[in-house]
Image: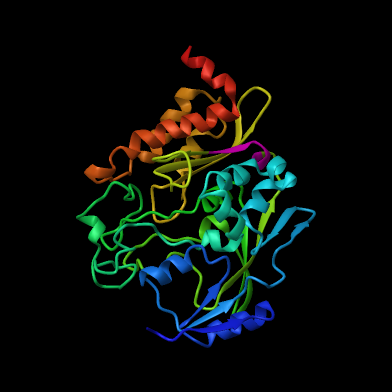
Amino acid sequence: MKELAYVRASDPAQAVATVADDPDARFLGGGTNLVDHLKLGITTPGTLVDISHLPLDGFEETADGLTIGANVRNSDLAADRRVRAGWPVVSRALLAGASGQIRNQATTGGNLLQRTRCVYFQDPTTPCNKREPGSGCSAAGGYGRYNAILGASPACVTVHPSDLAVALAAVDAAVLVLGPGGRRRIPAAELHRLPGDDAEHDTVLGHGDLITAVELPASALARRSTYVKVRDRASFAFALVSVAVALDLAEDGTVTDVRVVWGGVAHKPWRAERAEDALRGRPLTEAAVRAAADAELASAAPSSDAGYKVPMVRNATALAFRRLVPALAEEDR
């Protein structure tokens, strides 16, 4: 058994310095993902730096919106009245994830840093480039029902599991990071990355970088937003496909602005920019939504096991828009 040291950080700067100086150290927040990996033998850090007691658990109203501390629990974030009114997609995404008990433990920052639930990544006896770079990707030629259909590479075909990350990308949120080089602000849509030839890294963060907060900018777009999650069972299941939509409409029904972000389809939350461009400045109809989704899906390359995701994404996207604009459903009658 590997010896494991435990350090309780006294402030964010000390936590960052401790991890940055030790390549074998990891941050410990809510622990809902990390502890699983310790049990499975996926990760074997030498030091855990506990950040769960740091004063990063507050909400701050600003002139531009709302700032959420990285240690705010998922249940508290989902229940906050300001979030429910101003960024409903965030609340709905969180309530669609995990279980009540886990939401009470899981944190805002930790949710964004979840690692894939690929069955091969979680099995140390199988090759996995994400777990052991250069060993190969077992999922590429194995069980592929959960595989990516967009943005995959020969190195990795897995998908990112966070519901919250999908929602944040749809409302133009930003992630505040404290690292060895100082503070920086990263758009939520740019936090995660595609695998390319380097599947080991899920995000653009470096070793020692600590998420300290998330900024939610207020907008008409964010106020009219929703989240649709399709999964194998009604709770405690990761998305087969998910859709976050934020929409701003003119009085005549023309799309003034829109965000469409898909989960369960790629190594990162997939911002469907082709679909957005196809809708922006045009009257919103169900046919237009489906055509826009098809424009984005034109580059999809699913394996035979994951081919079901293509029509599922199209239908879930249409459902999300119908929830925001119920009149669209009248077109089918």
Q: How is the image coloured?
A: rainbow
16 and 5: which is toward the camera: 5
Compared to 310, does 57 lie above or below?
A: below
Compared to 92, does 131 lie above or below?
A: below
Residue 36 lies in what quarter of the image?
bottom left
Residue 329 in percent (x, y) is at 52, 19
Compared to 332, does 186 lie above or below?
A: below
143 and 314: which is toward the camera: 143
Residue 113 in percent (x, y) is at 50, 63
Residue 311 lies in what quarter of the image?
top left
Residue 4 in percent (x, y) is at 47, 84
Q: Quadrant of the N terminus?
A: bottom left
Q: Residue at x 68, y 24 (%)?
A: 251
53 and 305: which is toward the camera: 53
Q: Residue at x 30, y 73 (%)?
A: 133
Magenta span includes 116 = no
38 and 170: which is toward the camera: 38
- Looking at the image, residue 43 sits to the left or right of residue 261; the answer is left
- Looking at the image, residue 26 sits to the left or right of residue 74; the answer is left
- Looking at the image, residue 298 sits to the left or right of residue 87; the answer is left
Residue 201 visible: no
Q: Residue at x 58, y 19 (%)?
A: 327
Magenta span includes 226 = yes
Residue 182 visible: yes
In the image, which residues are magenta? 221-227
Residue 114 in percent (x, y) is at 48, 61
Q: Residue at x 55, y 51 (%)?
A: 164
Task: List the single residue furthest toward the left.
Answer: 141
